[in-house]
Amino acid sequence: MAGEFYTRVSDVALCQRCPALLAYMLHKGEKSAWRVGIRGNGHAYGSMFHKNIARVFFEAASDRGNPLHFRIASSIPGGSESLGALVRERIFLPFMEESSGRLETGQVMAMARGVDVWVRAMSDFFAGIPSLMRWPEGNMHTVFIPPEQKLQGSYGLPDGGRLIVTGCYDALMFNPDRAEARIFEFKGYMKSDIAVPLSQSLVYSWLIWKNTGVIPSVEIIYLDSAGREPDIFAPETVKAMIRSGLPGLFSSAYGVISRGRFPEILRDEKLCSACKFRMTCRDDWGNN
Ligand code: SF4
């Protein structure tokens, strides 16, 4: 029978990779199912970058009372060079000093690269906001949104069921001069795992669209992909992908979460070959 079920953005993204993996996590207590097939330093590493570097920046940029706020304002017109110097000196290096004993050399290098790529990406975005470049102090509050705001959206299924999706995006910025927005997602995955972060970002984009009426562009920064530029998806691309991909994905997630039907077994050769459930999943989930 149709009902109302709550879920998280990360669970919907896991369902996109394999509905049976979501079923293992939710109904058989396999908490590490999300890790199947993910290479690179993984989730912990991306969230370390986000929590200790990007979030510190966005908290300062969105709060006039923060000691770093006006330093950021004065560095914005100088482009990626001055903004990069500030981020390295005031955020990245203090974090490294505090935690270098816990990090491997490869992680430190990747984070330093991630800072460069991310600062360049932000500076490109700022260059398209004349009001910010003219007077950063007076316009930062219209550009920077406090990080990790919780969003919620409701999706109605054809059979009357309802999926309530909640999640906190990594970082969001607005361009008030063009009524545009951009989500940044920081990933410790390698770029070859594109479907993983993109599906998650599409669900966040849908939530932002529902909550603000604006469809954001999406920029995914890969900390483990040396020398590779981030992926940027324009709002029209994001809109088309939301329309073509999310109804089926929400329906599939709803089926798993509600236990309304057996999860589909996707038979993705590459993913399945790396999966610890490959010998049992057909039997565990209805042999479909
Ligand atoms: S073996 Fe393949 S289909 Fe089965 S749970 Fe793992 S990834 Fe999913």
Image (spheres, rainbow, N blue to C red):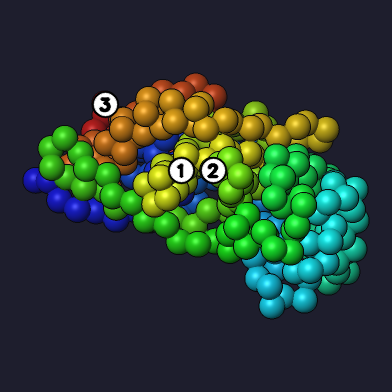
Res 214 label: 1
- Find out whether the residues at labels 1 and 2 contact each other: C-beta distance under 8 Å: yes
> Considering only order in the chain, which callout, 3 or 2, is on the residue closer to the N terminus?
2
Question: Measured from the top left, where is residue 88 in percent x and y?
Answer: 87, 58
Res 179 label: 2
Work out whether residue 32 can be spotted: yes
Crowding near pointer 1: few (<14 within 10 Å), some, many (20+)? some
Tell me how far mark 2 sits from mark 3, CA to CA.
47 Å
Residue at 31%, 30% in the rendered image: 248
**Left or right of residue 132, residue 96 in this image:** right
Looking at the picture, which amino acid does disc 1 mark? Val
Res 147 label: none
Residue at 31%, 32% in the rendered image: 247
User: Which quadrant of the figure has residue 94?
Assistant: bottom right
> Considering only order in the chain, which callout, 2 or 1, is on the residue closer to the N terminus?
2
User: Which quadrant of the figure has residue 127?
Assistant: top right
Work out whether residue 45 can be spotted: no
> Considering only order in the chain, which callout, 3 or 1, is on the residue closer to the N terminus?
1
Crowding near pointer 3: few (<14 within 10 Å), some, many (20+)? few
Residue 80 versus residue 278 in the image, above or below: below
Residue at 37%, 25% in the rendered image: 244
Q: Which of marks 1 and 2 is in front?
A: 2
Question: Measured from the top left, where is residue 271 in percent x and y?
Answer: 52, 29
- Find out whether the residues at labels 2 and 3 contact each other: C-beta distance under 8 Å: no
Secondary-structure class at tag 1: loop
Secondary-structure class at tag 3: loop
Q: Nearer the viewer, residue 152 or 267?
A: 152
Looking at the picture, which amino acid does disc 3 mark? Asn
**Left or right of residue 157, residue 14 in this image:** right
**Left or right of residue 49, residue 113 in this image:** right
Q: Which of marks 1 and 3 is in front?
A: 1
Residue under numbered circle 3: 288
